Image: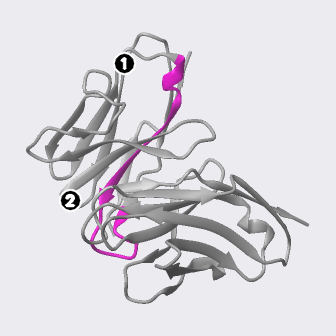
Amino acid sequence: AQSVTQLGSHVSVSEGALVLLRCNYSSSVPPYLFWYVQYPNQGLQLLLKYTSAATLVKGINGFEAEFKKSETSFHLTKPSAHMSDAAEYFCAVSTGSSNTGKLIFGQGTTLQVKP
Amino acid sequence: SAVISQKPSRDICQRGTSLTIQCQVDSQVTMMFWYRQQPGQSLTLIATANQGSEATYESGFVIDKFPISRPNLTFSTLTVSNMSPEDSSIYLCSVEDLGGDTGGYTFGSGTRLTVV
């Protein structure tokens, strides 16, 4: 069965610093992986998705993630944090044979950006 | 991309009552999903609803507590029955969305439920 683990429920960085949010997955089939962001009192917004086309995936707002099969990881990074990046971030894996099927979410990581 | 209208956006309900949440999609979709997000927590899948068949519930969720209807390819409802304060959560519907740039899934804006 597929699962996702996000390491670190809270991450705090200074504005302009590197953002690194960790995600490890478990899947018996080639996974489809996603990162979502949730701003306070708002819905989920897709940041990026991995669908086996390329291991380095670029998303919106300057975020990117690298799929590493050997490490079963899909960590999210951004070179320079901005105050507006403060939000909750969720890693998710699709259980389907393509990029559909149900999504299983990680526990979430709260990103705090300090001035 | 599919557009989802989820209603109500929020509600405050008395314990012991039931609330039905509606999810309307502007296009036909095969798979619809219902999630619960408890305060400060991640999203947990309640069930998958396919048109023309019974919903499939995840471990820990039962039909008597969360009955789901899926009468056609654009609509679904989730009922939270015999509510208690522990049911206070955000409930979201999601659809499989093979078109557009949503990554394969589109989410409704959620129903924020408070049970008092």
Q: Quadrant of the C terminus of chain A?
A: bottom right
Residue B98 falls within the magenta-colored stretch: yes
Q: What x and y, as percent, mark residue B11?
A: 50, 28
Q: What x and y, as percent, mark residue B66?
A: 31, 28
- Describe the element under mark 1 as helix, strand or loop: loop
Q: Are marks 1 and 2 in contact (CB under 8 Å)?
A: no
Q: Earlier in the sequence, mark 1 or mark 2?
A: 1
Of the pair B72 and A48, the residue shown nearer to us: A48
Of the pair B106 and B9, the residue shown nearer to us: B106
Q: Which residue is mark 2?
A: B29
Residue at the top extreme of this rendering: B16
Q: What x and y, as percent, mark residue A107?
A: 57, 50
**Residue at point 30%, 69% (across, down):** A29
- Describe the element under mark 2 as helix, strand or loop: loop
Q: Residues within 10 Å of mark 1 (few under 14, many from 20)?
A: some
The kind of residue on which mark 2 rests is Val
Residue range in magenta is B85-105
The kind of residue on which mark 1 rests is Ser
Q: Is residue B77 left or right of residue A70?
A: left
Residue at the front extreme of this rendering: A70
Q: CA distance from mark 1 to mark 2?
A: 27 Å
**Residue at point 40%, 13% (across, down):** B17
